[in-house]
Amino acid sequence: MKGVGLLGLFTIVMAACGGQQALEQRSFDDDQIFSPRDALQMYLVLTNEPTAMEAPSDVEDMWRAVRGELTAFSFVSKHVSQIRVPADYRVDVELDFASLPHPKLSAKRLRPILRGLPTVEREKGQRAILAVSFRSRSQTLPQGNHIRLVGAAVLRAAERYDGVVVDLLARRAFTAAAWRRELNRRSLHEGQTRLAKRRASNGSILLVSRGHIKYGAPDLVLGPVTAEEVSKARLFFRAAQRAILQGNPKPGEEISVSGQTMPLLNCGTRGFDGRCVRLTFQRDWP
């Protein structure tokens, strides 16, 4: 069985669009992330091709997609050319491989993520023999374009090797066609973050976010709340989400949500990189 092993670290320097300047600061409501910050992306491509992405030519082909040099990937350069990118902007992609089934990629862990796929694609993911892991640290860009750049690398592999895309941070799966549609959105926020519910044994509910780490901000845990409080808690959560994405505070610091100040607590559970904060639901929130 092929184990998890580091293939290498590949770096690309994006061409400047408008010179080396600080990125313009906009609000999350304007589909922008405030100022550049360090972000993490983690994806899997599940495939039945046992040697996917192992040849140097495969890697160079991947970078051609990221640079928008392939006709089918011209949307990448189109979107990136519409924003100001610092002249020294870099995208790093680290590739790992794991034969399936694998202890770190167990069916039990993947099954809930694959559940939302169409039947044929879900079965394709479940029967896959290889997982290609894409891990990338870069800085955020307006309209989620840092996700578009790394996502192009993932898309190239998924289309070339008839694979299924798994976003490990948002815990969501995509067909290759759906991932292409996602990357062609004007702004990527809607499909890149997710709000989920967890029900405790006593019936209380936790609201948790997934995908904030891709925007350089910690994921959130809110609760416990009762079933009757969920609707109001969702509104509170969205307001807190905007504050988190705009300010990027850390545990022990405070945020202001609609004029109310509250502390951020350690969430008690670790995410993929440990970035998670906990909020206490303010029942008297407007």
Image: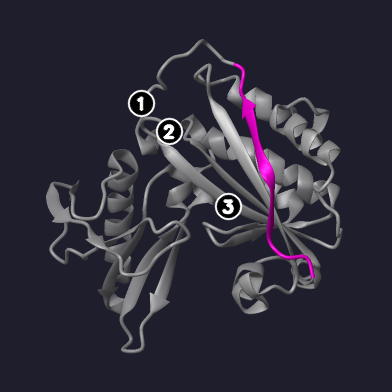
* Front residue of 198 and 17: 17
C-alpha distance separating marks 3 and 1: 26 Å
Residue 204 in the figure: left or right of residue 139: left
Q: Do the residues bearing badges 3 and 1 touch, measured as CB atoms within 8 Å?
A: no
C-alpha distance separating marks 2 and 1: 8 Å
Task: Please give the label number shown on residue 25.
Answer: 1
| Residue identifier under label 2 | 32
At x 74%, y 69%, the residue is 122
Residue 249 in the figure: left or right of residue 195: left
Residue 78 visible in the picture = yes
Q: Is residue 77 above or below residue 10?
A: above
Neighbourhood count class around disc 1 (C-alpha, 10 Å): few under 14, some 14–19, many 20 upward? few
Q: Does the magenta portion include 10?
A: yes
Q: Amino acid at mark 3?
A: Met
Q: Tell me residue 125's x, y (percent).
A: 75, 67
Q: Is residue 286 above or below residue 10?
A: below
The boundaries of the magenta stretch are: 1-15
Closest to the camera, between mark 2 and mark 3, is 3
Q: Tell me residue 24's x, y (percent).
A: 39, 22
Q: Tell me residue 35's x, y (percent).
A: 37, 30
Residue 186 visible in the picture = no
Q: Do the residues bearing badges 2 and 1 touch, measured as CB atoms within 8 Å?
A: yes
Which quarter of the picture shows residue 49? Answer: bottom right
At x 67%, y 30%, the residue is 76
Q: Tell me residue 178's x, y (percent).
A: 70, 51
* Front residue of 4 and 65: 4
Quadrant containing the N terminus in the rendered view: bottom right
C-alpha distance separating marks 2 and 3: 21 Å
